[in-house]
Image (tube, rainbow, N blue to C red):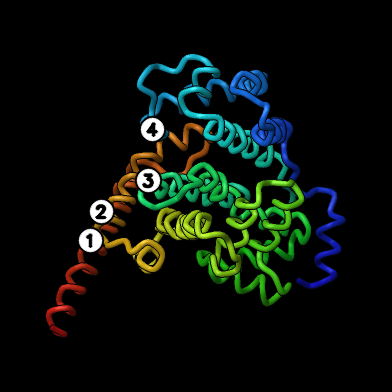
Amino acid sequence: MDPQLWERIKHCKTLPAIPSLPLQVLKLCRDEQADSKKIAEVISKDPTFVAKLLNVANSGFYGGARHQVTTISQGVTLLGMNAIATLAFCFSLYRDLRKKGTGQFDHARYWRRSILSSLAARVLGKWTPVLHKEECFLGALLQDIGMLVLSETLAEHYKNVYDEAGQDHGLLERLEQHQWGADHSAVGAWLAETWELPEILQHIIRGSHDPDRVQPSDDDRPAIQCVALSGRLADIWFYANTEKALEKALMDAVELSQAYFNFQPQEMLAILQEMNEGLPEISNFFEANIGSPEEGRNILALAQQLLATSIAGGIAQTAMTS
């Protein structure tokens, strides 16, 4: 990274700060003496989050509970401390940080892609051999947090780079590398380390563009690949303003899913369908407009058509070479 930029980042007084509630929850989760009662006590101090949590705990998207969850203690017991802590962290972080953005950077656009990525990671957790499902959900939400750091540090300069990249997240990464010798995944990993987040989250953020940038354990690698793929899946919704843009995002996701998890096009379509089903609940949880049902149906229909063409092409190619 450009040494001058590094110094500007470290001395920027408006960098994103970890909110109080998720910090308390994070510390409790690291405390071997902490129990569900302590977690519930901390979370219960935030009535808004309590309502959100109970709604999610009883939803089909988050697995649902066999019995109606009516208290935080029940939620912690039935869903587990890690799941509750992750939800608390995500909700509080989003609620606080979205209010603190300065300058002309498009924060609504930033958060829309981040939330779509967290939705994708949540769905992928059911389809992949991921041991750290909650870390994937949180890591996907945080994978681009370095963009907020750069937007606060560089203001108009970063906005211009962001605008130049337009609907190409890969181009944004390349422009950042060209300008400053580092991209937002590296900057985000630094922030995660500054916040003292678990190492797995630091690895997830650093490897969100290219999992080979980190050298995790065999157990952690699927989580990093899952989040890298989640961003490509988010782009299918995020860049669906034209058929050409959607096709590029879809083919990129299919290629990456085959490389990481050997997914077939039919499996990719099923994953996209699950994402579409989860859109209303995750939109409600974050109180964010990330796509209408009609948009989702149109995207699915076009994706199904494109994947059918891809499948037919693959069958024809196999017949020609056999």
Label 1 – label 4 distance at C-alpha: 30 Å
**Which residue in the structure is indicated by mark 3?**
126
**Mark 1: secondary structure:** helix
Give the residue drawn at x 60%, y 52%. 200
Residue 43 rendering spot, x and y as whole percentages: 63, 23
The relative height of residue 31 versus residue 159 in the rendered view (above or below) is: above
Residue at 20%, 74% in the rendered image: 313
Q: How many dots with numbers?
A: 4
Whether label 3 touches label 2, CB < 8 Å: no
Label 2, on which residue?
301
Q: CA distance from mark 3 to mark 4?
A: 10 Å
Rendering coords of residue 192 (x, y %):
70, 51
The image quarter containing residue 23 is top right
Name the residue at the top extreme.
Answer: 70
Q: Which residue is mark 1?
A: 305
Badge 2 vs badge 1, beta-carbon distance below 8 Å: yes
Mark 2 Cα shell of 10 Å, populated few (<14), some (14-19), many (≥20):
few
